[in-house]
Amino acid sequence: IRKQVRKNIKSNKLIQILEFPVLFLGAKPSNTPAFYNFMNYADFGLGTWHPIGGMYKVVEGMVALAESLGVEFRTNANVEKIITDATNKVSGLVVNGEQIDADLVLSGADYHHTETLLNENVRQYSENYWSKKTFAPSSLLFYVAFDKKLTNVCHHTLFFDSDFDVHAKDIYDTPRWPDNPLFYASFPSMTDDSFAPEDCEAATFLIPLAPGLEDTEELRELYFKKIIIRLEKLTNQDVQKNIIFKKSFCVNDFVEQYNSYKGNAYGLANTLFQTAFLRPKIKSNKVANLYFTGQLTVPGPGVPPALISGKIASDLITKNQ
């Protein structure tokens, strides 16, 4: 990507904008196939779309469709074990201590975590395999409410007032908390009135980080101060005294809530040797009726690829059953 972008673009600011999405793919621009420039085309050519009411409205729409087709959902249900029989086929699950029979299992959970629910002899990938893989970043997120409207920002705002290459190095080469991170800010209430009361603003701030970093409340607070001071300086406004709500989400939360390997937020990196058929398989080669979907398998991380993954898995299940 770096070679292709710099061949055609001379403006340093434009170069930074076109290379920034690569941070979430799991490698530096110099190590990411130019094919992934399609992300920039999707952003700038096709546009960024916002579902009124937020991304969860998409989830609610999918649930409503599924329920109309007879699907039953069980929420707050922790899968503790995948049971296989003597022929290495899934026969059931242990969910919240209760055994449930199953004809097949399609897991959209973290791939590594799903395999830990199996007996070791039917796992496809060892701990050594996962430890050698290159993962996309984790993130430090802040969900913030302001009791006034903000100025000099857009719904989607990227802050490039620090060195891109230094931050990328802190994620991929020598994993550490960055001194002066780039960050992304979203102000959805500028587009969608349902996100905040009148004359108020809702915001999400995101700092990409290396997975597996130490995560403490003190570090989170330190980095919130870093970015909010820079926001005030760059947009020429005071906002700290107008914060009426703040919640953070980081490495520990990705592990606790999603069983995410090392707390990654975006799955496996899209490096050349972790692309397409070189990614973990959708169908288990050791358990006949076990399938996988989501960001750690084909085609890769991100909402559209994860949805495509589900389509591929469903077609494969239909073909095999």
Image (cartoon, rainbow, N blue to C red):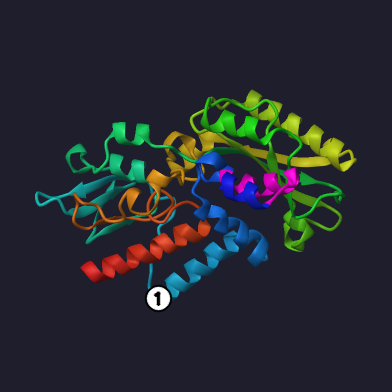
Q: Quadrant of the C terminus?
A: bottom left
Residue at (44, 76) in percent of width and height:
68
Residue extending farthest bottom: 68
Q: Nearer the viewer, residue 197 or 109?
A: 109
Q: Residue 111: where, in percent of width, then height?
A: 36, 46
57 to the left or right of 153: left
- Few, some or many C-alpha atoms within 10 Å of disc 1 (few <14, some 14-19, many ≥20)? few
Residue 201 against residue 256 in the figure, above or below: below
Q: Would you say residue 7 sits in the magenta stretch?
A: no
63 to the left or right of 130: right
Asked which secondary structure carries label 1, the reply is loop
Residue extending farthest left: 86
Residue at (65, 23) in percent of width and height:
218
Q: Residue 35: where, in percent of width, then height?
A: 50, 55
Residue 217, quarter of the rendered image: top right
Q: Residue 269: where, in percent of width, then height?
A: 46, 43
Q: What residue is pinned by disc 1?
A: 69
Residue at (55, 32) in percent of width and height:
171
